[in-house]
Image: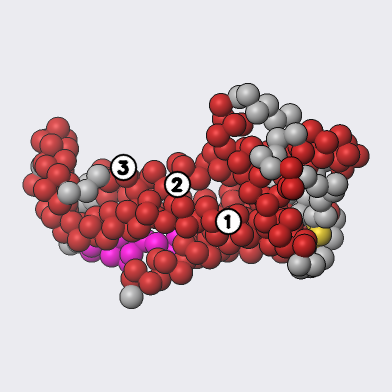
Amino acid sequence: MIDPSHPFDAIFIVPILNLLVFFYTIFSAIKLPGAFGFAIIALTVLVRLILHPLFQKQLHTAKKMQELKPHLDRLSTKHKQDPKTLQQQQLKLYQEAGINPASGCVFLIIQIPIFIALYRALQFFLTGENMKLAITSFNKMLYFPFLKIASIDPQFFGFNLALTPAQAGQWYYYLIPVITGFLQYYQVAVSVPKQQEGLVKKDESQKSTTGEDFQKAMNTQMKYIFPILIGWFSFQFPVGLSLYWNIFSIFSIMQYKNMHK
């Protein structure tokens, strides 16, 4: 259950519930088919707009890191026997360039509580046999009386957004994890520059540094393992969450492609 007095619920879950119902109320009023699905899409767009400055900063950091790569490679070669000096020189280079490599993770980290909040929101008022009780409790958490609802219709173009593909048992539900995994793979593919994906070729006599080996391993995991995990999660989670994740991925792909142009 959601506890409005709990800080996490009050900061993330209750506002998301209110936004979902706000959009759902508008789309239902204009008789838009699949109103709840479009409410999730509208919420995704809103979250994306709010996080846009962070995403732009992430893109800026990634572009700077790409430009610094030749210098980082030279430092790795020069100080490969002295990890402490190498770390100091790399930090100095980052400071001179005015970037913080860790800042690129902020965009990903801040999505985690939003994703958890949306998952719990979907769980809350798409609870099947307890729907009536859930709606009654839910209406008490709404900020404005005009948002109060009697029910939620989770249907969206033939999909029940409250079901997981594992529960649905219909073949077309199995397309959801495939599409979700592919979009995640494509997002990683367009976000990692080719220069970074395949590190600068060296003579056979030169060995890769520990940092380069680590980077190769991370690129491989991000490109292949992470999409498989996301696809598996979308198989186990409600379709409404996959809808949110996929719309978010499409926005990211468009912005990455625009940056690389």
Question: Quadrant location of the N terminus?
Answer: top right
Local packing at callout 3 (Cα closer than 10 Å; few below 14, some 14-19, many 20+) is few
| Location of residue 190 (image quadrant) | bottom left
* Residue farthest to the bottom, as pictured: 261
Residue plotted at (23% across, 57% down): 64
| Residue position for label 3 | 102
Residue depicted at 23% across the width and 63% down the height: 201
Q: What secondary structure is marked by label 3?
A: helix
Please tell me whether residue 72 is drawn above or below residue 174 in the rendered image. above
The part of the image, by quadrant, that contains residue 220 is bottom left
The residue most toward the top is: 5
Position of 103 with respect to 112 (left or right) is: left
Q: What residue is pinned by disc 1?
A: 44
| Badge 3 vs badge 2, beta-carbon distance below 8 Å | no
Q: Which residue is mark 2?
A: 108
Region rendered in magenta = 188-201
**Residue 205 shows in the view:** no
Q: Is residue 104 magenta?
A: no
Q: Determine whether the residue tagged by mark 2 lies in a helix, strand or loop.
A: helix
Amino acid type of the residue tagged 2 in the rendering: Leu
Magenta segment: does it hold 192? yes
Residue under the point 33% across and 64% down? 193
Horizontal side of residue 29 vs 5, given as left or right: right
- Compute the Cα span from label 1 to label 2: 15 Å
- Residue farthest left in this picture: 78
User: Is label 1 in contact with label 2 (beta carbons under 8 Å)?
Assistant: no
Q: Is residue 61 left or right of residue 33?
A: left
Q: Is residue 169 visible?
A: yes
